[in-house]
Image (cartoon, rainbow, N blue to C red):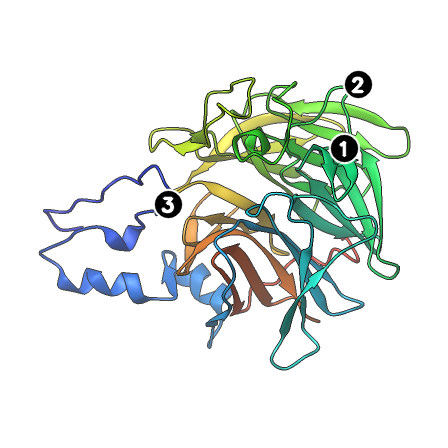
């Protein structure tokens, strides 16, 4: 990069200052970066995953609330995702009907309703959700942070887990289902910061493994300041966890005095890779593979070929398993999460604050209906 150049650090709000905002007065062509849909950092691998005619489309404008947990249900060809507060107590989720041309967006409410869903995946015909809201009365019922399944064929929701030996979980931010049926999830403290729960944190920020067949809950990592995204490689040998500790807040015991999370540009915004034991029960060999160059690494998933994707600020970064940045998809809104849809799983939908968009490329997602291991 020719001198003189300067990139300002991200500010305390979600208005990130992306790579394209870097000032390079001696190279006027650098300004073109801001208007590109795709930035390619590795010519060979980037061109391969994009294909000959990649496309990006902004499909739906949505509110500036957080939009999370997109889950594709192949049998229905529908994409379910969620809207967190504001407004407080908002219960409906959202669903995109991909059978329609153009796709349509509508509200969706399971029975019973599930409050403040933050993470989601699909396995064995069921939607798995991380419910991040806790309140004595939402929709007339008490609800607590935990793990929930929804059967899309019947619309019925079922709580699987709502406590750690009597303590409330904090958030249940993201999750995946291991081929052996265990559910791995992260539990940062964002629900308290964002006024989605009525009780101050009773547990530190941790990551867990839950075995539904026995009810056992085990801690798998206590290193992350705010563990956020969690994902499994296609061969089930590597787990990735993102730490978004750069976005945090001091904890008070009173909701009235609790401030929202603020961003520190020098804080933790790192993706870590771990080896997973042969029996699928514990992690070892933690190593950092990526420090987010824009905002924090929020949503986290692994493509069918092992590439790691994360929603970070106004876009999605595509990384090699070793953490090389290959491609960045650029958006005009903050991306929280994403999912692959369609028969060949090369259509890629992103959800976030202010928008829902679609990419068509060669990079396929994992087939969650038929896991490879």
Camera-side mark, 3 or 2: 2
Q: Where is residue 202 drawn, in percent x and y?
A: 65, 18
Residues under numbered marks 1 and 3 in contact, where contact means CB atoms less than 8 Å apart: no
Q: Check disc 3: other Cα within 10 Å, few if <14, some if 14-19, many if 20+.
A: many
Q: Where is residue 367 drawn, in percent x and y?
A: 72, 59
The answer to which image quadrant residue 203 occupies is top right
Q: Is residue 99 visible in this depiction of the protein?
A: yes
Residue 43 lies left or right of residue 103; in this view the side is left
Whichever of labels 3 and 2 marks the residue nearer the N terminus, that label is: 2
Residues under numbered marks 1 and 2 in contact, where contact means CB atoms less than 8 Å apart: no
Residue at image point 33% right, 33% down? 265
Q: Which residue is mark 3?
A: 294
Compare residues 338 and 250 and report the one nearer the observer: 250
Residue 299 lies left or right of residue 167; in this view the side is left
Could you tell me how many numbered marks the image carries? Answer: 3
Compare residues 221 and 115 and report the one nearer the observer: 115
Whichever of labels 1 and 3 marks the residue nearer the N terminus, that label is: 1
Q: Check disc 2: other Cα within 10 Å, few if <14, some if 14-19, many if 20+.
A: few
Q: Which residue is mark 1?
A: 280
Secondary structure under the numbered disc 2 in the rendered image: loop
Secondary structure under the numbered disc 1 in the rendered image: loop
Disc sitting over residue 165 in the figure = 2
Disc sitting over residue 209 in the figure = none
**How far, Cα to Cα, is label 3 from label 2?**
38 Å
Residue 111 lies left or right of residue 242; in this view the side is right
């Amino acid at each position: 990069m020719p001198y003189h150049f300067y990139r300002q650090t991200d500010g305390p709000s979600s208005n990130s200052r992306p790579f394209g905002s870097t000032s390079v007065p001696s190279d006027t062509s650098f300004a073109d970066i801001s208007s590109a849909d795709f930035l390619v950092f590795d010519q060979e691998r980037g061109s391969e995953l994009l294909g000959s005619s990649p496309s990006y489309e902004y499909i739906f404008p949505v509110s500036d609330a957080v939009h999370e947990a997109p889950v594709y249900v192949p049998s229905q060809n529908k994409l379910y995702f969620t809207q967190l507060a504001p407004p407080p107590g908002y219960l409906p989720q959202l669903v995109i009907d991909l059978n329609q041309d153009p796709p349509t967006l509508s509200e969706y409410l399971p029975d019973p309703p599930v409050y403040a869903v933050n993470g989601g995946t699909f396995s064995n015909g069921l939607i798995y959700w991380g419910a991040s809201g806790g309140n004595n009365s939402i929709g007339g019922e008490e609800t607590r942070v935990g793990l929930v399944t929804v059967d899309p064929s019947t619309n019925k929701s079922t709580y699987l887990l709502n406590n750690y030996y009597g303590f409330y979980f904090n958030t249940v931010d993201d999750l995946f289902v291991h081929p052996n049926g265990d559910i791995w999830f992260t539990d940062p403290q964002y629900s308290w910061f964002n006024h989605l729960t009525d009780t101050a944190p009773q547990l530190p920020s941790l990551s867990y493994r839950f075995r539904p067949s026995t009810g056992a809950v085990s801690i798998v990592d206590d290193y992350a300041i705010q563990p956020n995204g969690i994902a499994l490689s296609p061969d089930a040998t590597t787990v990735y966890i993102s730490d978004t500790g750069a976005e945090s807040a001091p904890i008070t015991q009173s909701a009235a005095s609790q401030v929202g999370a603020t961003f520190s540009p020098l804080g933790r915004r790192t993706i870590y890779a771990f080896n997973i034991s042969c029996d699928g029960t514990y992690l070892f060999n933690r190593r950092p593979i990526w420090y987010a160059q824009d905002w924090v690494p929020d949503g986290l998933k692994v493509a069918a070929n092992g590439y790691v994707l994360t929603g970070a600020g106004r876009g999605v970064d595509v990384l090699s398993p070793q953490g090389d940045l290959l491609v960045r998809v650029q958006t005009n809104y903050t991306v929280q999460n994403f999912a692959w849809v369609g028969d060949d799983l090369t259509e890629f939908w992103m959800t976030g604050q202010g928008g829902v968009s679609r990419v068509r490329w060669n990079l396929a997602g994992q087939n969650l209906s038929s896991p490879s291991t």
